[in-house]
Image (spheres, rainbow, N blue to C red):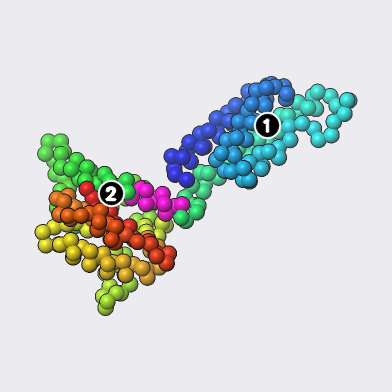
C-alpha cells in the first residue's frame, strides 16, 4: 500500500470517527446511524477485505441490549447504543494507529513493487532534473552531470526522497577473481542500484558485458534480491535502448534484474 493511498484511507476513517459525536445525540434507531454504520462497514470491506479482522471487529459491536423484554426501558437501549458507538470509535482509532505504526512493514513483495515504482519515477525525471540544475539564479555554481560520479551524486540525492536506508559503496562478493563496490544498496527493500553513464570510450557492447558481470556478482549477494541498473544516456549513444533493456532484464530463481536506459 502506497503512502498516498494509506493517508487517504486514514482520512476516510477519521471522517467516520468525527461523525460519532453527533450520532451520540440521536436516538439509536435513527436513519443517520444506520447509514453511518453501513458506510463504515463498506469502507472497511473495500480497504481490508470481506474477511478481514478489521471488518469482523467492527461488525461484532453491539448497539442494543443482549436481552430485552417489553419491560426494558428506552434508556437502556440508548445507553447500550452510546456504549456501542464508543466501542466503534475505539476500534476505528486503533485501525488508524495501526496504519500509521506499521506503515513501513508489510508484504516484502509489495514493498519491493512500490520501491521499483519509485525508482522508475526517479529515472524517468532524472534528465529533466539534471538539465534544471544547470539553470541557476545569477549563474551560481551547480552540478553539471558530466560523468558517472556526477550521476551517482545526483541519484543519491533523489533516492533520499523515497528511501530511508541507502548504503552507498557497499562491497560485493568476489566474481572472476575480483570484487567490486556496488553503487547503492537499498537494504530494507533488498535492491541494489547500479549506475552507468555512456561516453565515447564506453561502447554499447562494453556496457552489456559489464552488466552481465554485475548480474553474476549480485546474484550471490545476501542483501540483493533485485538488481536495478540505471544507464544514463543523455546523448543517445545507445542505438537500441529498448532492445538492450529487454536483452539484460530477467527474473530467475528468486533473483530479478531490471535495466533502465534514460532518457
Residue at the (13%, 41%) spot, across then down: 140
Secondary-structure class at tag 1:
helix
How many numbered circles does the render carry?
A: 2
Residue hosting label 1: 85
Range drawn in magenta: 110-119
Question: What is the x, y in percent for residue 119?
Answer: 33, 50
Residue at the (28%, 61%) spot, across then down: 247
Question: What is the x, y in percent for residue 191?
Answer: 37, 59
Question: Front-most of 48 and 129?
Answer: 48
Disc 1 or disc 2, which is closer to the eye?
2
Question: Front-most of 74 and 48?
Answer: 48
Residue hosting label 2: 123
Residue 118 is covered by the magenta coloring? yes
Question: Front-most of 253 and 97?
Answer: 253
The answer to whether 219 appears left or right of 234 in the picture is right
Question: Front-most of 206 and 29?
Answer: 206
Amino acid at each position: 500500500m502506497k503512502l498516498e493511498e494509506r493517508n487517504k484511507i486514514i482520512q476516510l476513517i477519521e471522517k467516520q470517527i468525527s461523525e460519532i459525536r453527533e450520532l451520540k445525540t440521536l436516538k439509536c434507531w435513527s436513519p443517520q446511524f444506520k447509514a453511518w454504520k453501513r458506510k463504515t462497514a463498506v469502507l472497511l470491506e473495500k480497504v481490508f477485505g470481506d474477511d478481514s479482522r478489521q471488518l469482523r471487529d467492527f461488525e461484532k459491536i453491539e448497539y442494543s441490549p443482549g436481552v430485552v423484554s417489553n419491560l426494558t426501558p428506552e434508556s437502556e437501549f440508548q445507553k447500550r447504543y452510546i456504549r456501542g458507538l464508543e466501542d466503534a470509535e475505539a476500534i476505528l482509532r486503533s485501525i488508524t494507529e495501526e496504519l500509521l505504526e506499521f506503515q513501513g512493514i508489510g508484504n516484502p513483495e509489495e514493498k519491493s513493487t512500490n520501491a521499483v515504482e519509485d525508482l522508475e519515477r526517479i529515472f524517468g525525471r532524472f534528465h529533466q532534473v539534471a538539465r534544471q540544475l544547470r539553470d541557476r539564479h545569477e549563474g551560481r555554481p551547480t552540478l553539471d552531470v558530466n560523468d558517472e560520479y556526477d550521476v551517482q551524486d545526483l541519484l543519491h540525492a533523489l533516492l533520499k526522497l523515497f528511501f530511508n536506508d541507502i548504503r552507498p559503496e557497499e562491497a560485493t562478493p568476489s566474481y572472476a577473481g575480483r570484487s567490486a563496490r556496488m553503487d547503492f544498496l537499498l537494504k530494507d527493500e533488498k535492491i541494489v542500484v547500479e549506475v552507468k553513464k555512456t561516453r565515447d570510450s564506453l561502447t554499447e557492447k562494453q556496457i552489456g558485458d559489464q552488466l552481465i558481470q554485475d548480474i553474476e556478482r549480485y546474484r550471490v549477494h545476501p542483501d540483493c534480491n533485485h538488481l536495478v541498473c540505471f544507464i544514463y544516456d543523455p546523448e543517445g549513444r545507445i542505438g537500441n535502448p529498448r532492445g538492450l533493456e529487454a536483452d539484460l532484464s530477467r527474473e530467475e530463481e528468486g533473483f530479478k534484474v531490471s535495466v533502465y536506459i534514460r532518457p
